[in-house]
Image (tube, helix red, strand yellow):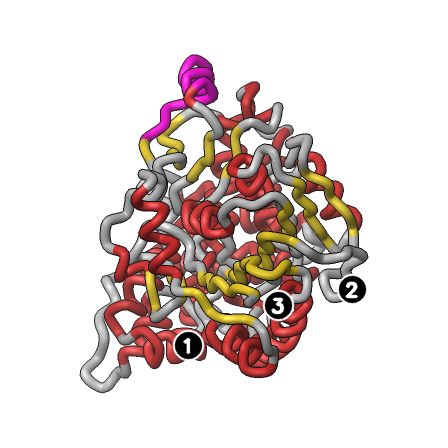
Amino acid sequence: MSISPARTVAFDILLRVDQQNAYASELLHSERLDKLAPADRGLAMELVMGVLRWRSRLDDEIAAAASRPLKKLDAEVLNALRLAAYQLQFLTRVPPHAAINDSVELVKRAQKRSAAPFANAVLRKIAEARTEPVQPSADEAPVSFLAREYAHPEWLVERWVAQFGTERTRQICEFDQRIPTTSLRLENVDTERELTSEGVKLAPGVLLASSRTLVEGDLTRTHAYIEGRVFIQDEASQLVAALVGTGSRLLDCCAAPGGKTAAMAWRNPAAQIIAVEIHEHRAGLVRKRVRAANVKVIAADALQLPLAGGFDRVLADVPCSGTGTFARNPDIKWRLAVGTLSELHTKQVAILRAALQQLAAGGRAVYSTCSLEKEENEAVVEEVLRDTEGYQLRDCREELEKLRATGELKWEDLDSLLNGRFLRTVPGVQPCDGFFAAVMEKR
C-alpha cells in the first residue's frame, strides 16, 4: 500500500528531530520538501509543526489508549502514532482511515512490522474516543493545567508564572500553539510593487513601518526573494536591529542567519560593516543572504575576534535557549533542560564582554536574545556591567522614542515594550517572538 508523500516526509523529519536532535525549521526547508507538490508540501509542514507543538498532549492520548508504557515503544512506532493522533485530534478535514492506515504502513516501512497490529489498535481506540474540552479540576494548580492544556514543559511554565504571572503565561503558551504570521522586511516600495505583481499579497506590519505581513502567495518563488531583496524576519528581530542605530563602523558578533546584519546594512549604506560567525558553513549562509557591498563576513570566534576594535556600533545577538520563539520552533521546548540555561549564561557573559571591548569611546553595543529567561537576559547584562568598568546602561525608552519620532516605530504602547531600561517583547502581548535587548555605551 502506498503512503502519502506528505506523511512519509513528515514521519522522517519527526524521527530525525527525535533521534538526532535535528532542527525541524532546517529540515522543513530542505530540498526534499521542494520536490513535493504544493499541497503535499503544505501538509508535511502542518504535520511536523503540529506534532511538535502538541507532542505532550498527543502522548497523553496515546498513553491512555496503549497497553504498554510509551518509554518502551520504539521511536519509529511512537512517532507514527503521534503523526496519526495529531490528524485525528486536530485535522478534521483528514479522513480517520487515511491517517490510521498511513501511520500503520509507516510502522511497517520502518521495519517494525510486528508492532503494526498494536499501532492499529491504539489509533482506532483514539479515533473512537470522544474528546471533550479539558477543564481544570478544583485541586489542579494553574501551572499543571497550563502545561497540560497548552503542551508545554511544566518546569518552564512554572518559571514563567513566577516571572510574568498566570494570565500573561497563558497568553505566551496560547501564542506558542498558533501558526505565527510571516513577517517581512522590505528595503523599498518598488520591491513591494514587484511582489504584488507576482501574486504575493501583503499587509502592513504591526510594530514597524518598514515591515510587512505575508497574507497569501508563494514568496520563495518571487524574483525579489531569490535575489535577496526581501527578508523573512520576525518584527521583534527587526526592532532589535533598529536599536543598533547608525555609525561609520559596525560589528555584528554572531551574525547568522544574517537578517539583522542585512537590516544594519540597509540603515547604514555608507558604513563599513563586519559580520562575524564562528562556523564557516554558517558564515557562508550569511554571505549568500546578505549581498550588501559594504558588508564583510568573516568566520571567527566572537571571544577571539581578529579585529582592532574602534566600532561605533556593536551587536551581540548571542546564542540562546530560544524560549521566545516556540511558535516557530516548537521542537526546542522538548530538548531544553534547566541546566542548559546556566551553560548558556556563562557563554553569553563571555561574548558580551568581548563585544564591549570592540567599542570606540562613545560607541554603543546592543545585547540581545530571543529568550524569555532572566538568566540569559538581565542577569547577563548586570553581571558584565558590575565586573567591567567604563560602560553604562542606556534606557531603551529613549531609543524607542527616537524610532517613533521618525515614524519607524508604529507601536503606541511603549510601556508594554519595556522592562525597566530593557527592551522586552512578549509573545501574545505583542504579535511577535519574545526578544530581549539592552543598550550599553562606552564612556
Chain part drawn in magenta? 190-203
Q: Is residue 420 in view?
A: yes
Element class at badge 3 = helix
Three-letter amino acid code at the position of disc 2 = Gln
Number of residue marks: 3
Q: Is residue 114 left or right of residue 367?
A: right
Is 200 in the magenta? yes
Q: CA distance from mark 2 to mark 1?
A: 38 Å
Circle nearer the N terminus (2, 3): 2
Which residue in the structure is indicated by mark 2? Answer: 304
Query: Residue 154 has which mark?
Result: 1
Circle nearer the N terminus (3, 1): 1
Three-letter amino acid code at the position of disc 1 = Glu
Q: Pick the quarter of the image with the C terminus.
A: bottom right
Q: CA distance from mark 2 to mark 3?
A: 12 Å
Three-letter amino acid code at the position of disc 3 = Leu
Query: Residue 352 has which mark?
Result: 3
Q: Residue at x 78, y 64 (%)?
A: 304
* Contact, mark 2 vs mark 1 (Cβ under 8 Å): no
Q: Is residue 395 above or below residue 404?
A: below
Task: Please tell me which residue lies in front, 86 or 278.
Answer: 278
Circle nearer the N terminus (2, 1): 1
Is 421 in the magenta? no
Q: Residue at x 51, y 51 (%)?
A: 244
Q: Residue at x 44, y 59 (%)?
A: 435
Q: CA distance from mark 3 to mark 1?
A: 31 Å
